[in-house]
Image (cartoon, grey):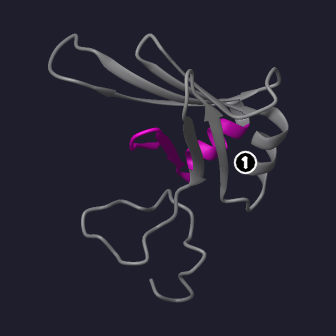
Amino acid sequence: MKIRISGNSLRLRLSVSEVEEFERNGRVNDSVQFGLGTTPTLTYSLRRSEAIGNVNAEFYDNQILISIPAAEADEWARTDTIGITATQGLNGSGILRILIEKDFVCLNKRPHVDETDLYPHPNAQGVC
């Protein structure tokens, strides 16, 4: 699972096997370690939730947790729907933009990049 953070914007991109894991278990996680040895780790997770009405993101204990309402999560995981877009109000003012997408192979081949577990690009039409 790839994460991109830019200002008040979060984007997750999931491979085929990660979407399958999410559909099967209702959750998928990944993490990045900083430094050597027993160092801080940032974990990011996507979960399906029966208890919420809107996509939301939380941050606690070095974890970013993005939750998707169950019906919306099921629709996304089981169909050709590419992504889920949401906004979340922030304390004070402003919004957090959240985007969850299925990850596609690139239209231009990149050496040394394994794209075998990614979705076929919908605009490929014989380009690759």
Q: Residues within 10 Å of mark 1 (few under 14, many from 20)?
A: many
Residue 83: percent from the left, percent from the top? Answer: 65, 54
Three-letter amino acid code at the position of disc 1: Ala
Residue 28: percent from the left, percent from the top? Answer: 57, 32
- Nearer to the camera, 47 or 54: 54
Left or right of residue 90, residue 22 in this image: right
- Nearer to the camera, 114 or 79: 79
Q: What residue sits 76% from the left and 33% below the top?
A: 54
* On screen, residue 79 above or below 97: below
Left or right of residue 128, residue 86 in this image: right
Q: Which quarter of the picture shows residue 89?
A: top right
Q: What residue sits 22% from the left and 24% below the top?
A: 34
Question: Tag 1's secondary structure?
Answer: helix
* On screen, residue 119 above or below 128: above
Residue 9: percent from the left, percent from the top? Answer: 48, 42
* On screen, residue 113 above or below 15: below
| Numbered disc total | 1
14 in magenta: yes
**Which residue of the protein is positioned furthest toward the front in this rendering?**
93
**Which residue of the protein is positioned furthest toward the bottom in this rendering?**
126
31 in magenta: no
Q: Which quarter of the picture shows residue 109?
A: bottom left
**Quarter of the image where the C terminus is located:** bottom left
Q: What residue sits 56% from the left and 70% below the top?
A: 120
- Nearer to the camera, 24 or 72: 72
Region in magenta: 1-23
The residue where tag 1 is placed is: 77
Residue 80: percent from the left, percent from the top? Answer: 73, 62
* On screen, residue 66 above or below 126: above
Q: What residue sits 57% from the left and 36% below the top?
A: 95
Left or right of residue 27, residue 117 in this image: left
